[in-house]
Image: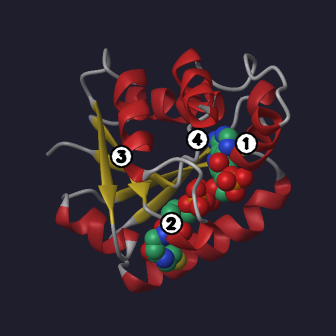
Amino acid sequence: MKTIAIYPGTFDPITYGHIDIVKRGSHLFDKVIVAIAESKRKTPVFSLAKRMELAKEIFVDHGNIEITSFEGLIVDFAQQNNAWILLRGVRTLTDIELEFQLASMNHQMKPNIETVFLKSADQFANISSTIVREIAAMGGNLTPFVPPQVIAAFRQLKK
Ligand code: COA
């Protein structure tokens, strides 16, 4: 049986930190599904279609990485896709508290679904999409944090 992991998030925008976790996950599992949430509550800067397009471009050469969107509970989405693993990246100790809460709630809803954590690589441990958006809005250099496709997408937003 294939081991499928779901990597959920808003990805507004996707950063090198997310990309690192997905690629490392793709070496551990047969398939990683990057599941992009609409996250209306967060009022994303990039449309769901754009966030999907960027992720698809970035992982185009990776046969076992799939990009999709989802609505509703992540555990339901995982079950529909025969995926029993939720993959999450942990950047700092502060992340752990929220991640444990999410993992625990998800496990109580669907005990057959496990959350697997990967520690973020040190160089990406302080990146957040919010800070990336702030740097973009102020015209700062985004090169260390996001790939060129994302920088181009920010330029398009300004037009
Ligand atoms: N590298 C860089 N940044 C990272 C990162 C990493 N490895 N991991 C997380 N982040 C950042 C994200 O970019 C995001 O930054 P931002 O808040 O500045 O935009 C922040 O950390 C939080 O990320 P995350 O926890 O993934 O939140 P999210 O909003 O992107 O996604 C969902 C949260 C979608 C996974 C979660 O709300 C969910 O599962 N929703 C579905 C509904 C559901 O099932 N709810 C019940 C859950 S118990």
How far is disc 2 from disc 3 in space, using C-alphas?
13 Å
Q: Dot 4, crowdedness within 10 Å: few (<14), some or many (≥20)?
A: many
- Please, is residue 136 above or below residue 97 in the view? above
Q: CA distance from mark 2 to mark 4?
A: 12 Å
Q: Visible in this render: residue 119?
A: no
Numbered tag placed on residue 63 in the rendering = none
Residue at (26% x, 29% y) in the render: 64
Q: Work out whether mark 1 precedes mark 2 in sequence or the reverse, and give the earlier one.
A: 2
Q: Which mark is residue 13?
A: 4
Across and down, in percent, residue 154 comes to 62, 31
Which of the two labelled residues, at mark 3 and mark 4, occupies the earlier sequence position?
4
Quarter of the image with the C terminus is top right
Locate residue 143: give its quadrant. Answer: top right
What residue does disc 1 label? 133
The verdict on label 1 being within 8 Å of ligand 1 is yes
Q: Does ligand 1 reach within 8 Å of label 4's beta carbon?
A: no
Residue drawn at x 58%, y 16% as measured from the top left = 148
| Amino acid at circle 3 | Ala
Spatial CA distance of label 4 from label 1 is: 8 Å
Amino acid at the residue labelled 4: Pro
Instruction: Give the quarter the ligand 1 occupies.
Output: bottom right
Mark 3 vs mark 4: in front = 3
Q: Are marks 4 and 1 in contact (CB under 8 Å)?
A: yes
Q: Could you tell me the amino acid type at mark 2?
A: Ser
Closer to the chain start, of discs 4 and 1, is 4
